[in-house]
Image: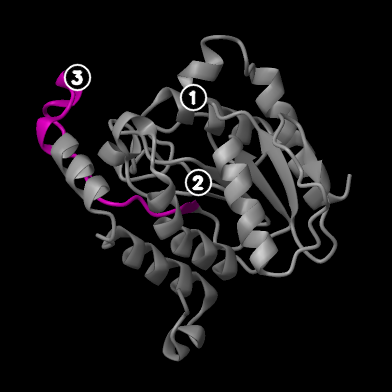
Amino acid sequence: MVVRPDRARLPYHRVVLDLAIEISECRLCPRLVEWREAVAIEKRAAFRDESYWGRPVPGFGDPSARVLVVGLAPAAHGANRTGRMFTGDRSGDWLYRALFQTGFANQPGATGPDDGLELSDAYVTSIVHCAPPANKPTTVERGTCRRWLEAEYSALARLEVIVALGGMAFDQMLRVLADRGAPLPKPRTKFGHGATLDLPGFPALLASYHPSQQNTFTGRLTEPMIRSVFAEARRLVDGR
């Protein structure tokens, strides 16, 4: 997406706000539109009295962020319900606890859009903005939604570090950076927890396993592991 000239003259925070509005109105992927809206009508029994967001979920955080956190997609009964990235599910509990412990969040939990959570120097988004069936967006859907990831990357002008949660987010960020001329190493860097890719003139790319229940319940990802990734992000932006 190209920012229109009139928006380019707006204050920086307004550009990010306008982008969030555009994302929330997207209907480009028919399968995802149908699924997210069906989930919002049927609901989970535990949330039957709540109003679901049921739309694309925009990124969330500090528009002056130096750290961009990129996940996979909104959870059907998490962000698709609350309307805020990684909010209302166990993956978000792990993520925001790690951000709190490393000074990027003012509290360790995220239950809903009015819970008082604020991010400082961090912005959270995903490579797909709609909840997908079985939490598996197709290759076409990831490609279609990439325009929004590219627009968010461009709008966050102070970025120094990108934390990719999971292999799909890592690969998609490599594509975004390559398209902008980042000097990617050859052979191509493989995803692995804790991997760090330094790119002169571009944000550093850090990799973490996604804090999904599949990873946290099995012990593949532990709290010290995810915290260490964000501690490294803190070290890089603060020069410690």
Report which residue position mark 3 lands on.
46
Q: Quadrant of the N terminus?
A: bottom left
Q: Residue 118 carries which label?
A: 2
- Tag 1's secondary structure? loop
The image shows residue 74 at horizontal and vertical percentages of 38, 40
The image shows residue 178 at horizontal and vertical percentages of 69, 62
Q: Residue at x 75, y 35 (%)?
A: 231
Q: Do the residues labelled 3 and 1 touch (CB within 8 Å)?
A: no
The image shows residue 7 at horizontal and vertical percentages of 44, 84
Q: Give the mark, 3 or 2, whose residue is nearer the N terminus.
A: 3
In the image, taking residue 232 as reference, residue 119 lies left or right, namely left
Report which residue position mark 1 lands on.
212
Q: Where 134 falls versus 177 (above or below)?
A: above
The image shows residue 129 at horizontal and vertical percentages of 38, 50
Q: Specify how the rendered protein is coloured.
A: one colour
Task: Identify the magenta region.
Answer: 41-60
Q: Quadrant of the C terminus?
A: top right
